[in-house]
Image (cartoon, rainbow, N blue to C red):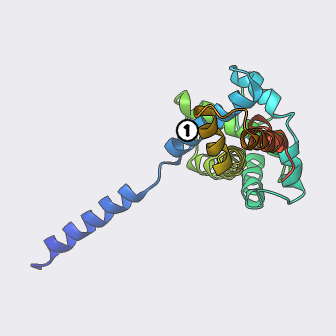
Amino acid sequence: MRDVPFLHQGFRQMIDWFERAQIDYREHFLTLYIAYNAWYREVTGLANDRAAIQMLKKRFVIWDDYIQHRTMERLGCVVEKIAEITQRNPLRISAVMQWSGEVAGRDDWRSLIEYWYYVRCTIVHGGYIDERHAYLAYESLGIFMEEIIGRVKMCIEGLRTSEADELTRLAQAGAQHTERFVRLQQKLYLKYKAMPSVREVDMQRV
């Protein structure tokens, strides 16, 4: 019996560490949504969330690529899970949201956009959100933002070249009229023209 207190302490430690290891997907989703919010306000030019979301639902190119299995391959099975639980127990949606509260299936990306917004609003306004919804919203939005961030980085990195650095050095040295400067300037201009707009990354074919 002398080892019983030790075992009890061990079990208490086990439970404590297990509870510390649990991920609060509500918090992680909100952090992720902040990045998403910053992106969609930038690309739509709208500060009002409802108006911006309505605009997002018209930006179909990236979603057509998704439907045709050209991008975000991991997203499909997550959306199917969201469709399953929202059809079994439709979300209670206010009339303001203009959405049925259900995701119809893998290809119902417009409802997925509404789903993300619903989960965000529920958490921010202190409502109850099932842990499964928080997790699935986090997982699905994470896959989407991973694709968006990857495309944005490609655009930004397209201008980070040694040629651009050299052009800057030549300009600082007052060599704007040299043949080398003119040639570099023309080359980078053509590269810039061919580069997809950062604000249109979801409207560019990959």
User: Quadrant where the N terminus lies?
Assistant: bottom left
Q: Residue at x 80, y 33 (%)?
A: 56
Whether 126 is drawn above or below 185: the answer is above
Residue 77 in percent (x, y) is at 75, 60
Category of crowding for the residue at label 1, using alpha-carbon neighbours closer than 10 angstroms: few (below 14), some (14–19), many (at least 20): many
User: Label 1 sits on what residue type?
Assistant: Leu
* Front residue (pair 105, 199): 199
From the viewer's perspective, tell me whether residue 187 is left or right of residue 14. right
* Front residue (pair 179, 6): 179
Q: Quadrant of residue 70?
A: bottom right
From the viewer's perspective, tell me whether residue 102 is left or right of residue 49. right
Residue 61 in percent (x, y) is at 88, 44
- State whether residue 181 appears in this view: yes
* Front residue (pair 116, 36): 36
Residue 152 in percent (x, y) is at 70, 44
Residue 48 in percent (x, y) is at 70, 20
- State whether residue 161 appears in this view: no
Whether 21 is drawn above or below 128: the answer is below
Q: Which residue is mark 1?
A: 30
Q: Residue at x 30, y 59 (%)?
A: 16
Q: Residue furthest left?
A: 2
